[in-house]
Image: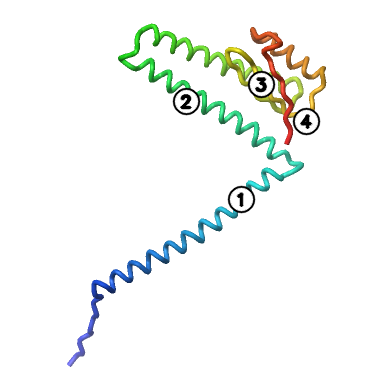
C-alpha cells in the first residue's frame, strides 16, 4: 500500500501570523532601502554644495533659477488660460488676460535674448528676469567691475525700454 502523503493546512491564525511576518519583513527591507538611498542622496547633495572648485553649486543655482522661473511662468499662463476659457469671465477681463499672456511671451523672448547677449560679451553665465517695473540680471562672476556693469547695462538699455534705475545687476559665485 502506498502511503498517503499528509498535507497540513494552516489554521486561520497561522495564516495571519505568516502574513504578519511577511509584512514586518517588507517593512524592514523598506526601512533599510530608505536609509541607504537617503544616505546616497545626502552625500550627493554635500558634494554639490561643498564641491568647491568645480563650480557645481553655481551651475545648480543658475539651472535651478531658470527652472523656477519657467515653472512660475507656466503657472501664470495656466491661470490666464483658465480666465480666458471661463464662460463666466467678461470680455474685458478675457482681453486683459490675453494682453498679459502676450506681455509674458515678450518677457520670455527678451530674457533669452539678453542672456545670450550677456554671454556673448564674455560672461560665463547670466540669468535675466523681467517684470513690468524692473529687470534683474544675475551674472556668474565673483565680482563685477564698473566697466563690466556698464557693458551689461548698455546691452540692456539698447535692447529694452527700461531706464538705468530699473535695472539691477548682481554678481554671483558659490
Q: Is residue 102 above or below residue 145?
A: above
**Percent of width and height locating residue 106:** 55, 13
**Percent of width and height locating residue 44:** 63, 48
**Quarter of the rendering containing residue 161:** top right
- Which residue in the protein does label 3 denote? 115
Question: Helix, strand or loop at disc 4?
Answer: loop
Which numbered disc flags the more N-terminal residue, 3 or 4?
3
Q: Is residue 117 above or below residue 142?
A: above
Residue farthest to the bottom, as pictured? 1
Question: Helix, strand or loop at disc 3?
Answer: helix
- Which residue in the protein does label 2 denote? 75
> How many residues crowd mark 1 within 10 Å: few (<14), some (14–19), many (20+)?
few
- Which residue in the protein does label 4 denote? 142
Which numbered disc flags the more N-terminal residue, 1 or 2?
1
> How many residues crowd mark 3 within 10 Å: few (<14), some (14–19), many (20+)?
many
- Marks 1,3: beta carbons within 8 A: no
Amino acid at each position: 500500500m502506498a502511503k498517503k502523503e499528509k498535507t497540513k493546512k494552516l489554521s486561520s491564525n497561522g495564516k495571519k501570523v505568516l502574513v504578519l511576518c511577511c509584512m514586518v519583513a517588507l517593512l524592514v527591507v523598506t526601512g533599510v532601502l530608505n536609509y541607504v538611498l537617503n544616505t546616497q542622496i545626502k552625500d550627493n547633495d554635500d558634494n554639490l554644495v561643498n564641491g568647491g572648485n568645480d563650480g557645481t553649486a553655481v551651475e545648480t543655482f543658475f539651472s535651478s533659477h531658470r527652472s523656477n522661473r519657467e515653472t512660475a511662468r507656466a503657472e501664470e499662463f495656466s491661470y490666464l488660460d483658465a480666465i480666458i476659457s471661463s464662460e463666466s469671465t467678461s470680455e474685458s477681463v478675457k482681453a486683459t488676460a490675453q494682453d498679459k499672456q502676450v506681455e509674458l511671451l515678450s518677457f520670455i523672448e527678451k530674457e533669452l535674448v539678453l542672456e545670450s547677449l550677456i554671454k556673448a560679451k564674455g560672461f560665463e553665465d547670466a540669468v535675466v528676469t523681467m517684470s513690468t517695473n524692473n529687470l534683474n540680471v544675475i551674472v556668474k562672476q565673483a565680482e563685477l567691475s564698473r566697466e563690466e556693469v556698464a557693458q551689461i547695462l548698455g546691452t540692456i538699455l539698447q535692447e529694452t525700454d527700461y531706464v538705468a534705475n530699473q535695472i539691477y545687476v548682481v554678481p554671483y559665485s558659490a
